């Protein structure tokens, strides 16, 4: 079977049987995001396949093999192939068509990779972690705040392949934005790579702004009048979600630095200046995350201190009431010893005098504790 036939068999684009296969894939793969018009209505991992020449989208078929054949026949332009969570079988023909390195293909399929940039011959392979803020009515000890995904990018001299993992991070709006700027898109696959990196970092900053609202809300509750009753599990959960965000943001610093400074044949020299701008934005995101982590540590320590102070106040109140109760207990204990010869036992006003002494003593102790802030 020819290479084109293999790819058509993989993607299910050659016959009606392929449509049935992709329909089954749809039932097994409910996480495909169809909210954007660019999503594939057939459920295949191939989301879109577009050919560009001089920064302009060509009105050609979305079949990957035909698009690559026509583009390479003209000797100009590049193909942008978008995939969503492909399987080994679905990606095999595409990897053969574009001569992708097996190690990069394995990383693209398996996902759960650290952000990185690697060069395999004339192909650049980049991994980006995507993040999304999870809306919630109230932060609890089990709330999910940050959801992560991944975007893998293969960039060659005449192709860009994007492999997306996760429900969020759709590249449809990004593609439309690039198509509205033909001059930038005409710089080739590196322009797409920059746009994806810029899009990912912008999402970082957007999520950080939302997380800041949660941090501010927790801080306000901790320092409120009843802040000692705040569940510390909420603070720990926010720190855990912040750690998830850190894992997506911080490791991307070195790959962006390489793209901005290290010469790659795939990357247009003019695009490297844009990567430096993205790296600056990433540095700001990294600093904000570090500041949030330190602030949450301070909030947690302040919460524990308030709990300790509240416990001390409770202990002082308990001690004060115990001292007040001790006075009548002592007097009653003395007169409850039942000796035959005790003072005031036969006195007519003895009972009233003892009760009065106990009441005056208790009131005096209560007033003294109130004045000193114990009650």
Image (tube, helix red, strand yellow):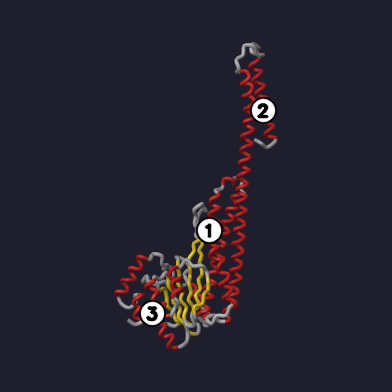
The spot of residue 338 in percent (x, y) is 60, 15
Q: Which residue is drawn at the image coordinates 53% and 50% (left, top)?
A: 233
The spot of residue 35 in percent (x, y) is 43, 68
- For residue 102, which quarter of the picture? bottom left
Q: Is residue 76 above or below residue 275?
A: below
Ranked by sequence position, the earlier of labels 1 and 3 is: 3
Ranked by sequence position, the earlier of labels 2 and 3 is: 3
User: Mark 2: which secondary structure?
Assistant: helix
Residue ranking furthest to the left: 17
State the residue position of label 2: 363
Residue ranking furthest to the front: 103
Mark 1 touching mark 3, by CB under 8 A? no
The N terminus, quarter of image: bottom left
Instruction: Say whether residue 246 is left or right of residue 349.
Output: left
The spot of residue 128 in percent (x, y) is 51, 70
User: Mark 3: which secondary structure?
Assistant: loop
Q: Who is closer to the viewer here, 134 or 328?
A: 328
Q: Who is closer to the viewer here, 58 or 125?
A: 125
The spot of residue 343 in percent (x, y) is 67, 14
Q: Which mark is residue 63?
A: 3
The answer to whether residue 37 is visible is no
Ranked by sequence position, the earlier of labels 1 and 2 is: 1
Q: Who is closer to the viewer here, 193 or 139?
A: 193
Q: Which mark is residue 241?
A: 1
The answer to whether residue 214 is visible is yes
User: Mark 1: which secondary structure?
Assistant: helix
Mark 2 touching mark 3, by CB under 8 A? no
Instruction: Say whether residue 24 is left or right of residue 337.
Output: left
């Amino acid at each position: 079977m020819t290479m084109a036939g293999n790819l058509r068999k993989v993607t299910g684009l050659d016959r009606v049987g392929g449509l049935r296969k992709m329909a089954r894939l749809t039932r097994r793969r409910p996480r495909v995001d169809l909210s954007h018009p660019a999503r594939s209505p057939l459920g295949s991992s191939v989301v879109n396949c577009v050919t560009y020449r001089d920064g302009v989208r060509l009105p050609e078929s979305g079949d990957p093999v035909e698009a690559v054949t026509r583009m390479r026949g003209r000797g100009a332009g590049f193909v942008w192939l978008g995939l969503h969570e492909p399987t080994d079988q679905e990606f095999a023909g595409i990897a053969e068509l574009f001569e992708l390195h097996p190690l990069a293909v394995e990383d693209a399929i398996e996902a759960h990779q650290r952000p990185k940039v690697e060069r395999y011959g004339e192909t650049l392979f980049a991994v980006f972690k995507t993040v999304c803020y999870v809306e919630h009515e109230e932060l609890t000890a089990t709330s999910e705040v940050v959801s992560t995904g991944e975007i893998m990018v293969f960039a060659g001299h005449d192709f860009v392949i994007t492999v997306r993992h996760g429900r969020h991070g759709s590249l449809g709006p990004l593609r439309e934005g690039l198509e509205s700027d033909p001059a930038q898109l005409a710089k080739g696959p590196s322009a797409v790579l920059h746009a994806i990196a810029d899009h990912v970092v912008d999402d970082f900053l957007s999520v950080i702004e939302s997380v800041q609202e949660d941090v501010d809300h927790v801080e306000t509750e901790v320092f409120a009048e009843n802040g000692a009753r705040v569940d510390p599990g909420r603070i720990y959960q926010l720190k855990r979600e912040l750690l998830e965000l850190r894992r997506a943001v911080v490791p991307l610093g070195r790959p962006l630095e390489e793209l901005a400074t290290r010469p790659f044949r795939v990357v247009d020299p003019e695009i490297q200046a844009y990567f430096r701008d993205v790296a600056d934005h990433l540095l700001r995101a990294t600093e904000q995350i570090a500041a949030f982590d330190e602030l949450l540590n301070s909030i947690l320590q302040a919460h524990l201190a308030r709990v300790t102070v509240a416990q001390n106040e409770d202990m002082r109140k308990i001690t004060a009431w115990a001292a007040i109760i001790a006075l009548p207990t002592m007097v009653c204990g003395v007169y409850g010893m039942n000796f035959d010869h005790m003072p005031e036992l036969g006195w007519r006003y003895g009972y009233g005098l003892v009760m009065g002494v106990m009441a005056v003593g208790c009131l005096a102790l209560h007033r003294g504790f109130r004045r000193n802030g114990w009650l």
